[in-house]
Image (tube, rainbow, N blue to C red):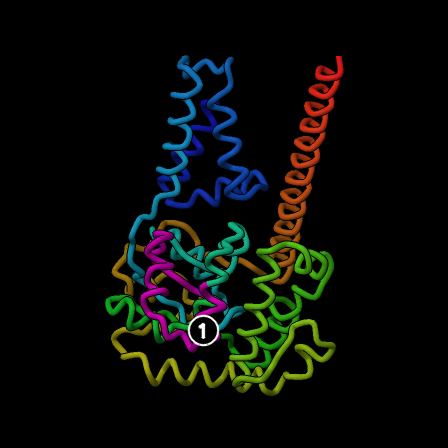
Amino acid sequence: HIPLLHQCYQARRKSNYFELAGSIGVGPVWFLFVVISLLTRNNIKIMPFPNSIRLIFAVALVSFITSPSNAALEVIGSGYGRTGTDTLREALNELGYKTYHMREIMKGQLLSDIKVWHDQIENDCSDVEALRDLFERGGWTAALDFPTVMCYESLMIAFPQAKIIHTERKSSEQWWNSASNSIMIIASLFPFNVLHAVIPFLKIRKAMLNSMWSKVLGGKNITISDDDFPLGYKEEFIAAYEANNARVRKVVPRKRLLIQDHSKGWTDLCTFLNKEVPDIPYPHVNTLNDFYKFANNVAMKVAFGVTFAFAVFVLAVKKLMSLLTNNNKIKES
């Protein structure tokens, strides 16, 4: 059990227990169940105390791991997804930031976050306090990618000291080819199309995506399962992408803005953030192949979590039925 406790410590140090829970393919509830189960076993050697004491310790441990860090955003990304946002996430993490990204939402199955984003997108990101709370509660110090980019102007108000980093592709056509073959269609591909129909987290995420893409296209009523999505909206998507790039340059003060060119590596980024240049190559991640590998990995973990939960439920029902049957036999005898 020592390795488990070490992992707990590492998760707390990163202020991200979802990473620990996600690494074993389960959600927060099952993580709590596993920790309490391990720490209340009679044969555990590292805690020779009564079960009640162990239970209190286990709950306190999980509470400690999951407590908010109340950090403030220092970096806000204003570039659309598939403009190198995951590369920027890797770079910022290397510089010491804890970076929020759609990848983190999916990896941690952050249901409460998806609900906040759905509400914010539907209401033009008007609740600045809710946005501030979302990031402070999670201890995030940087935020990029969809859905963050939908509210970057409100986040500039919520975190007035934060710097803005904008990413874009060399051409609009290049962005479209990447986005239309990944983030715009993944929810309609197997097995995600099935999982989106039955998993609460993914069902709400689908509703959020419908609202998000509708907002990107100026308020059109978009459903990602439509036969003509996204190819039927190519011109509108490209126009929205170009309009976002132009608006960032218009509304963000020049001293507060960096247009990050990944081909230049660390230099501009580290100068802008007043950080030392790391002694490692600048990252380049999340190609289309990387994207689908990650998506399939998430799908497998979600499916495993559902299967595990169902199996535990069936075993619990069987155990209950067995106890009821034995009680009835005792009464009859």
- Please say if 68 is above or below 186: above
Residue situated furthest front in the rendering: 332
Quarter holding residue 329: top right
Q: In the rendered picture of this protein, how many numbered marks are placed on residues?
A: 1
- Please say if 37 is above or below 198: above
- Please say if 219 is above or below 106: below
In the foreground, 205 or 267: 205
Position in image of residue 209 (x %, y %): 57, 69
Amino acid under disc 1: Met
- Taking the image as shown, residue 240 lies to the left or right of residue 246, namely right
Q: Is residue 132 magenta?
A: yes
Residue name at image x 66 percent, y 60 percent: 196
Q: Is residue 33 magenta?
A: no
Residue name at image x 72 percent, y 19 percent: 326
Provide the secondary structure element on which disc 1 rests.
helix
Position in image of residue 117 (x %, y %): 46, 66
- Taking the image as shown, residue 143 lies to the left or right of residue 27, namely left
Which quadrant, please, contains the C terminus? Answer: top right
Quarter holding residue 232: bottom right
In the foreground, 41 or 21: 41
Residue name at image x 32 percent, y 56 percent: 136
| Majority SS type along the magenta span | helix
- Please say if 104 is above or below 220: above
Crowd band around label 1 with a 10 angstrom C-alpha radius: few (<14), some (14–19), many (20+): many
Residue name at image x 60 percent, y 82 percent: 221
In the foreground, 165 or 297: 297
Position in image of residue 321 (x %, y %): 71, 28
Q: Which residue is mark 1?
A: 150
Magenta stretch? Answer: 116-144
